[in-house]
Protein backbone atom coordinates (compact mmCIF):
# COMPACT_ATOMS: atom_id res chain seq x y z
CA UNK A 1 0.00 0.00 0.00
CA UNK A 2 1.27 3.46 -0.92
CA UNK A 3 1.91 5.89 1.92
CA UNK A 4 -0.39 8.93 2.07
CA UNK A 5 1.51 11.87 0.56
CA UNK A 6 2.75 14.40 3.09
CA UNK A 7 0.69 17.23 1.55
CA UNK A 8 -2.56 15.26 1.87
CA UNK A 9 -1.80 14.46 5.49
CA UNK A 10 -1.27 18.17 6.14
CA UNK A 11 -4.63 19.01 4.57
CA UNK A 12 -6.23 16.38 6.78
CA UNK A 13 -4.68 17.91 9.89
CA UNK A 14 -5.79 21.41 8.85
CA UNK A 15 -9.36 20.22 8.20
CA UNK A 16 -9.48 18.54 11.59
CA UNK A 17 -8.15 21.68 13.28
CA UNK A 18 -10.75 23.78 11.47
CA UNK A 19 -13.55 21.47 12.57
CA UNK A 20 -12.42 21.63 16.19
CA UNK A 21 -12.20 25.45 16.04
CA UNK A 22 -15.66 25.59 14.46
CA UNK A 23 -17.25 23.49 17.19
CA UNK A 24 -15.39 25.54 19.79
CA UNK A 25 -16.74 28.84 18.49
CA UNK A 26 -20.28 27.41 18.33
CA UNK A 27 -20.02 26.48 21.99
CA UNK A 28 -18.78 30.01 22.79
CA UNK A 29 -21.59 31.63 20.80
CA UNK A 30 -24.17 29.64 22.76
CA UNK A 31 -22.63 30.48 26.09
CA UNK A 32 -24.99 32.74 28.06
CA UNK A 33 -22.02 33.95 30.11
CA UNK A 34 -20.18 35.25 27.05
CA UNK A 35 -20.68 38.83 28.30
CA UNK A 36 -19.20 37.87 31.65
CA UNK A 37 -16.19 36.19 30.07
CA UNK A 38 -15.57 39.10 27.69
CA UNK A 39 -15.85 41.66 30.50
CA UNK A 40 -13.41 39.68 32.65
CA UNK A 41 -10.86 39.43 29.85
CA UNK A 42 -11.20 43.14 29.12
CA UNK A 43 -10.75 44.31 32.71
CA UNK A 44 -8.79 41.58 34.44
CA UNK A 45 -11.53 41.66 37.10
CA UNK A 46 -14.10 39.13 38.32
CA UNK A 47 -17.75 39.99 37.68
CA UNK A 48 -19.13 38.17 40.76
CA UNK A 49 -16.67 39.97 43.05
CA UNK A 50 -17.53 43.28 41.38
CA UNK A 51 -21.16 42.83 42.35
CA UNK A 52 -20.20 42.28 45.98
CA UNK A 53 -17.90 45.33 45.93
CA UNK A 54 -20.66 47.52 44.46
CA UNK A 55 -23.00 46.42 47.26
CA UNK A 56 -20.38 46.95 49.95
CA UNK A 57 -19.37 50.39 48.64
CA UNK A 58 -22.96 51.62 48.44
CA UNK A 59 -22.80 52.85 44.87
CA UNK A 60 -26.57 52.26 44.98
CA UNK A 61 -27.00 55.42 47.04
CA UNK A 62 -26.28 57.48 43.92
CA UNK A 63 -26.82 55.22 40.93
CA UNK A 64 -29.42 53.03 39.27
CA UNK A 65 -27.49 49.77 38.71
CA UNK A 66 -29.10 46.72 37.07
CA UNK A 67 -28.80 43.55 39.16
CA UNK A 68 -28.10 45.41 42.42
CA UNK A 69 -30.94 45.32 44.94
CA UNK A 70 -32.31 48.75 45.77
CA UNK A 71 -29.94 50.60 43.44
CA UNK A 72 -32.23 53.49 42.58
CA UNK A 73 -30.01 56.47 43.45
CA UNK A 74 -30.52 59.59 41.36
CA UNK A 75 -27.46 61.67 42.29
CA UNK A 76 -25.38 60.23 39.45
CA UNK A 77 -26.35 58.85 36.04
CA UNK A 78 -27.88 55.39 35.69
CA UNK A 79 -25.18 52.79 35.09
CA UNK A 80 -27.51 50.78 32.88
CA UNK A 81 -25.86 50.90 29.48
CA UNK A 82 -22.66 52.48 30.76
CA UNK A 83 -20.63 49.89 28.85
CA UNK A 84 -21.82 51.17 25.51
CA UNK A 85 -21.23 54.90 26.21
CA UNK A 86 -18.29 56.51 24.43
CA UNK A 87 -17.02 58.44 27.41
CA UNK A 88 -16.99 58.31 31.20
CA UNK A 89 -18.27 61.48 32.86
CA UNK A 90 -17.86 63.05 29.41
CA UNK A 91 -14.12 63.22 30.01
CA UNK A 92 -12.41 59.85 29.74
CA UNK A 93 -12.37 57.35 26.94
CA UNK A 94 -14.64 54.48 27.99
CA UNK A 95 -12.22 51.57 28.07
CA UNK A 96 -11.00 49.38 30.93
CA UNK A 97 -8.18 51.78 31.90
CA UNK A 98 -10.48 54.80 31.79
CA UNK A 99 -13.14 53.05 33.87
CA UNK A 100 -10.67 51.88 36.51
CA UNK A 101 -9.13 55.37 36.71
CA UNK A 102 -12.56 56.95 37.15
CA UNK A 103 -13.68 54.47 39.82
CA UNK A 104 -10.53 55.00 41.86
CA UNK A 105 -10.03 58.75 41.42
CA UNK A 106 -13.19 60.54 40.27
CA UNK A 107 -12.12 63.73 42.04
CA UNK A 108 -8.77 63.82 40.26
CA UNK A 109 -10.50 63.35 36.90
CA UNK A 110 -13.34 65.81 37.48
CA UNK A 111 -12.55 67.98 40.52
CA UNK A 112 -15.62 68.99 42.49
CA UNK A 113 -18.04 66.52 40.86
CA UNK A 114 -20.54 64.82 43.16
CA UNK A 115 -18.90 61.36 43.08
CA UNK A 116 -16.50 61.08 46.02
CA UNK A 117 -13.17 59.27 46.02
CA UNK A 118 -14.00 56.12 47.94
CA UNK A 119 -10.52 54.68 48.34
CA UNK A 120 -11.19 51.69 46.06
CA UNK A 121 -8.23 49.38 45.56
CA UNK A 122 -7.10 48.55 42.04
CA UNK A 123 -8.55 45.06 42.58
CA UNK A 124 -11.98 46.39 43.59
CA UNK A 125 -12.04 48.86 40.69
CA UNK A 126 -11.16 46.09 38.23
CA UNK A 127 -13.88 43.82 39.61
CA UNK A 128 -16.45 46.63 39.52
CA UNK A 129 -15.44 47.54 35.96
CA UNK A 130 -15.92 43.89 35.00
CA UNK A 131 -19.41 43.90 36.54
CA UNK A 132 -20.40 47.13 34.77
CA UNK A 133 -19.07 45.91 31.42
CA UNK A 134 -20.90 42.59 31.80
CA UNK A 135 -24.25 44.40 31.87
CA UNK A 136 -24.15 45.43 28.22
CA UNK A 137 -21.88 45.05 25.27
CA UNK A 138 -18.48 46.32 26.35
CA UNK A 139 -16.74 49.03 24.35
CA UNK A 140 -14.44 47.78 21.61
C1 LIG B 1 -22.38 60.41 46.38
C2 LIG B 1 -22.85 59.94 45.08
C3 LIG B 1 -22.06 58.90 44.34
C4 LIG B 1 -21.57 57.70 44.78
C5 LIG B 1 -21.58 57.13 46.21
C6 LIG B 1 -21.01 57.03 43.63
N1 LIG B 1 -21.17 57.80 42.52
FE1 LIG B 1 -20.64 57.29 40.62
N2 LIG B 1 -21.17 59.12 39.97
C7 LIG B 1 -21.78 60.10 40.72
C8 LIG B 1 -21.98 61.29 39.92
C9 LIG B 1 -22.60 62.60 40.37
C10 LIG B 1 -21.45 60.99 38.63
C11 LIG B 1 -21.39 61.92 37.41
C12 LIG B 1 -20.05 62.62 37.40
C13 LIG B 1 -19.85 63.52 36.21
O1 LIG B 1 -20.36 63.23 35.13
O2 LIG B 1 -19.15 64.53 36.39
C14 LIG B 1 -20.97 59.61 38.70
C15 LIG B 1 -20.45 58.94 37.63
C16 LIG B 1 -20.14 57.60 37.63
C17 LIG B 1 -19.75 56.85 36.48
C18 LIG B 1 -19.62 57.40 35.05
C19 LIG B 1 -20.96 57.25 34.38
C20 LIG B 1 -21.02 57.83 33.00
O3 LIG B 1 -21.90 57.42 32.23
O4 LIG B 1 -20.23 58.71 32.65
C21 LIG B 1 -19.55 55.57 36.88
C22 LIG B 1 -19.14 54.39 36.01
C23 LIG B 1 -19.80 55.53 38.30
N3 LIG B 1 -20.16 56.79 38.72
C24 LIG B 1 -19.71 54.40 39.08
C25 LIG B 1 -19.83 54.40 40.46
C26 LIG B 1 -19.57 53.24 41.28
C27 LIG B 1 -19.20 51.87 40.77
C28 LIG B 1 -19.73 53.64 42.57
C29 LIG B 1 -19.48 52.85 43.82
C30 LIG B 1 -18.13 52.34 43.96
C31 LIG B 1 -20.14 55.02 42.55
N4 LIG B 1 -20.19 55.44 41.24
C32 LIG B 1 -20.45 55.78 43.67
C33 LIG B 1 -22.13 59.99 42.05
C34 LIG B 1 -21.79 58.94 42.89
Image: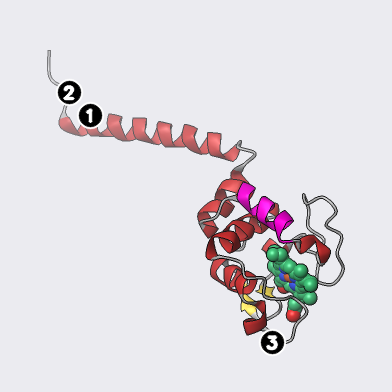
C-alpha gap between disc 1 and disc 2: 7 Å
Q: Position of residue 111 (x, y in %)?
A: 69, 87
What residue would you read off at disc 1? 9
Is 97 placed left or right of 33 in the picture? left
User: Ligand 1 is located in which of the four quadrants?
Assistant: bottom right
Within 10 Å of the Cα at label 2, are there few (<14), some (14-19), or many (20+) other Cα atoms? few
Q: Does residue 4 belong to the magenta stretch?
A: no
What residue would you read off at disc 3? 111
Residue sitting farthest toward the bottom: 111
Q: Which quadrant of the rendered structure holds the C terminus? A: bottom right
Within 10 Å of the Cα at label 3, are there few (<14), some (14-19), or many (20+) other Cα atoms? few
Q: Which quadrant of the rendered structure holds the N terminus? A: top left
Comes first in the chain, label 1 or label 2: 2
Say which quarter of the image contains residue 78: bottom right
Within 10 Å of the Cα at label 1, are there few (<14), some (14-19), or many (20+) other Cα atoms? few
Comes first in the chain, label 2 or label 3: 2
Q: Does residue 55 belong to the magenta stretch?
A: yes
Amino acid sequence: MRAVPESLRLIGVLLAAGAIAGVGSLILLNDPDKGVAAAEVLTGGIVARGKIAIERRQCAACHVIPGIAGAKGQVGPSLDGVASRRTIAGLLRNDADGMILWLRHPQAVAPGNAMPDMGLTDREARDIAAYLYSLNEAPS
